[in-house]
Image: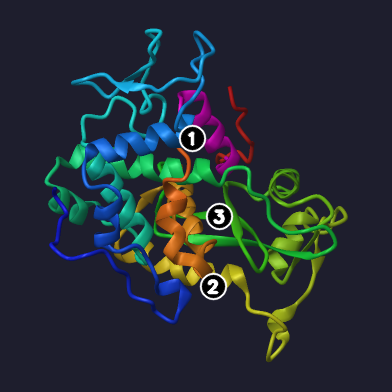
Amino acid sequence: MVFDLGYPPHNTHNPRPGYRGTSLQEFHAAFPDNEACLRHIFETRYGQCPTCPNCRKPKKWYRISGTTRFQHPCGKAISPRGQTLFHNSQIPLQLWFYTMLHFANSHEGVNTGFLQRHLGVSQTHVYAMTRKTRMHLAALDQLNKVGEAGKQVLVRLEKLLGVNVKVPGGQNRASALFVADSEQIQSTVVGRARRSLLRMIIQRKVCTGAIPVTDCSWTYRALSDYGRRRSVVELLPTFMLAKPDSPDPIRSFLLHFKRPMINNYRRVDKDYLWLYLKEFEFRFNRRQRSQEIFGDMISAFPVLTSPVRQQLADWNFADLLGKVRRAP
């Protein structure tokens, strides 16, 4: 019992919804050991009494002693950790779940140096755990789209500084296209802001029938091919208003994202910038129910094979040539 603090689980009821979270006592009550974590993964992926794919009979599965696999009475065995973020990992599952708890409760991001000292594992393992956790968060929200039919969706191009671009003579910055409504935000890292590329991203991440608008002249010009074609968004210069009708979700998100990028994540490679955006998006999109973030993290365990990881990268990253790479 690594995290037994000796008193019953409880949680503080902060009046501000974005400051609530999952306490260490609640975590230990739900996952006191590795066996509880493994059982949760199995039941989440397959159910409490899943049908065997071999004999087609729904009977109780038994844990194979000394392994992380479960076996059906007919002899069929499955590994609930297979093809997920835990695949082929030697780190105890309780430490994996504890790492995810830090991602859920953090406002400033997760510093790998702190996590390495906290968990007592090597730097290589910590980098792998944090990268796979961010990939897991991206997979959970992959199919989410922004907006509703007949309602406005805010679109904006932003430059993110302090990014490590592995190009000789390249500037240390990257561009990202954000689409947002009052509830959630989605981002895509882009290279050259071409109209065809930006239009494709909007079609992918905005619900059918929603009305894309922008208050950024650069975004409007890029989406009109700098005046040579009709823009795919409507320009609403709300920056000229003393009091806008509603808060700007993109600016709110960037206020939470840029400071940790300077303090904790210094000089992130552009190839991995989209993973850090997905981490902060996952928390930002649940800011009104932050006490449920950890529960959402472990509510499903998507398959993360190489083709799926490539598809996630293609969905959220466009290379320097302004082309969207095709998923295998």
What residue is pinned by disc 2? 252
The tag earlier along the polypeptide, 3 or 1, is 3
Q: Could you say whether the residue bearing mark 3 is in a helix, strand or loop?
A: strand
Predominant SS of the magenta segment: helix
Q: How is the image coloured?
A: rainbow
Would you place residue 244 above or below residue 284 in this image?
below
Q: Is residue 268 left or right of residue 287?
A: left
The answer to whether residue 48 of the structure is visible from this angle is: yes
Query: Which label lies toward us, 3 or 1?
Result: 1
Residue 157 in percent (x, y) is at: 63, 60
What's the residue type where badge 2 is placed?
Ser
Residue placed most toward the observer, 255 or 12:
12
Residue 15 in percent (x, y) is at: 44, 82
Quadrant of the drawing holding the C terminus? top right
Marks 2 and 1, how far apart at CA: 29 Å
Q: Could you say whether the residue bearing mark 2 is in a helix, strand or loop?
A: helix
Residue 309 on the magenta segment: yes
Marks 3 and 1, how far apart at CA: 28 Å
What crowding class fits label 3: few (fewer than 14 Cα within 10 Å), some (14-19), or many (20 or more)? some
Residue placed most toward the observer, 13 or 104:
13
Tell me if label 3 and label 2 are in contact, CB under 8 Å: no
What residue is pinned by disc 1? 302
Would you place residue 41 above or below residue 175 in this image?
above
Query: Which region of the structure is painted magenta?
Result: 302-318
Could you say which disc has been placed on residue 175 in the image? 3
Query: Which label lies toward us, 2 or 1?
Result: 1
What's the residue type where badge 3 is placed?
Ser
Q: Is residue 314 left or right of residue 170?
A: right
The answer to whether residue 266 of the structure is visible from this angle is: no
